[in-house]
Image: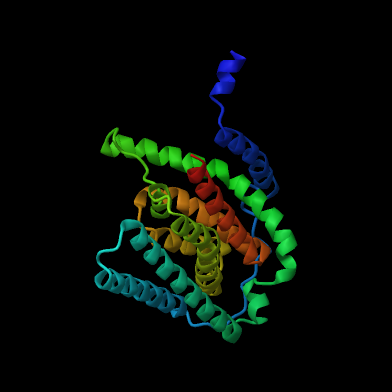
């Protein structure tokens, strides 16, 4: 019986069980989350509320136009090279947007980059805290995936399944090393930094400047973060992850913490796919 039971235990089960302990401790210490952000204060800035939206629209438009032009100019490339160029454009666009964000922060945030949450002196605390934060949220992410699959099959039939993320599909379908290296760098380094600077650093900060509740600012920015990801099957789990990212930023005041959580989450997903 012991051998049979052990045969059904996976790494995911072990990680979920381990994550229940810090999550349970957090619930007890914060009165089920009600007192978790009582000491949170808005980050001082004079940024216009529409600025993050303008930046997001420009980035989306520029990337879409660049990809469309590339497809027209180079229509006969093999699939993996098309995927490589698409990821390269996304990567370059994200880096350009990060440069713009840093410029905005220096002009509109009190204490500039430190007021934005980019203080290198906090990295030694943020990395281990990010590991614990991610571990704590794994049980919730797993529960959301199980519920999404359950209700999906209930509504759309037994053939329903949660699709893989587009980047993970590319890395599975194409074994070419240059593409895989680019996808790994993009998903583990570029995307976490860019998305956290935009959605937590700018959007959440702007919303926090106009609402009393820090939780409301987290929920609004998390909803926006979730909606820009095209596959609705990922939305429940992505929303839970985004709330964790927003809470980590609001609680610590450091943007490095949600960046590390995001990077670790993407890294674990990518490594899992490559290992399989």
**Residue 165 percent across, percent down from the top left:** 41, 51
In the rendered view, how is the structure colored? rainbow
**Residue 22 percent across, percent down from the top left:** 67, 43
Query: For this rendering, which residue is in front, 34 or 69?
Result: 69
Q: Name the image quarter holding the N terminus.
A: top right
**Residue 273 percent across, percent down from the top left:** 48, 44
**Residue 139 percent across, percent down from the top left:** 56, 41
Task: Identify whether 55 is placed above or below 264.
Answer: below
Task: Identify whether 227 is placed above or below 4.
Answer: below
* Residue in view at x 25 percent, y 66 percent: 75
Query: For this rendering, which residue is in front, 208 or 17?
Result: 17
* Residue in view at x 41 percent, y 79 percent: 54
Count how many numbered circles sit on residues in the image. Answer: 0
Task: Identify whether 47 is placed above or below 257.
Answer: below
Task: Identify whether 130 is placed above or below 221.
Answer: above
* Residue in view at x 64 percent, y 45 percent: 27
Query: For this rendering, which residue is in front, 185 or 45?
Result: 185
* Residue in view at x 37 percent, y 43 percent: 162
Q: Residue furthest top?
A: 1
Quarter occupied by residue 20: top right
């Amino acid at each position: 019986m012991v051998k049979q039971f052990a045969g059904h235990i996976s790494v995911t089960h072990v990680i979920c069980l381990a994550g229940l302990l810090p999550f349970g401790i957090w619930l007890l210490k914060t009165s089920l989350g009600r007192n978790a952000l009582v000491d949170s204060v808005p980050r001082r800035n004079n940024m216009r509320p529409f600025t993050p939206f303008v930046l997001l629209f420009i980035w989306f438009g520029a990337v879409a136009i660049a990809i469309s032009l590339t497809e027209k100019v180079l229509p006969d490339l093999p699939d993996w090279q098309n995927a490589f160029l698409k990821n390269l454009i996304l990567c370059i666009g994200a880096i350009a947007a990060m440069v713009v964000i840093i410029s905005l922060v220096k002009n509109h945030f009190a204490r500039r980059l430190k007021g934005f949450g980019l203080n290198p002196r906090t990295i030694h605390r943020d990395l281990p805290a990010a590991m614990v934060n991610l571990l704590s949220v794994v049980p919730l992410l797993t529960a959301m995936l199980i519920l999404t699959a359950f209700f999906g099959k209930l509504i759309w039939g037994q053939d329903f399944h949660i699709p893989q993320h587009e980047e993970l599909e590319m890395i599975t379908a194409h074994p070419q090393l240059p593409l895989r290296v680019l996808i790994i760098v993009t998903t583990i380094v570029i995307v976490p930094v860019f998305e956290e600077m935009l959605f937590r650093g700018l959007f959440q900060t702007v919303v926090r400047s106009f609402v009393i509740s820090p939780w409301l600012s987290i929920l609004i920015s998390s909803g926006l973060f979730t909606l820009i990801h095209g596959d609705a099957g990922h939305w429940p789990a992505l929303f839970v992850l985004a709330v964790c990212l927003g809470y980590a930023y609001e609680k610590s005041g450091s943007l490095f913490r949600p960046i590390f959580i995001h990077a670790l989450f993407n890294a674990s997903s990518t490594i899992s796919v490559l290992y399989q």
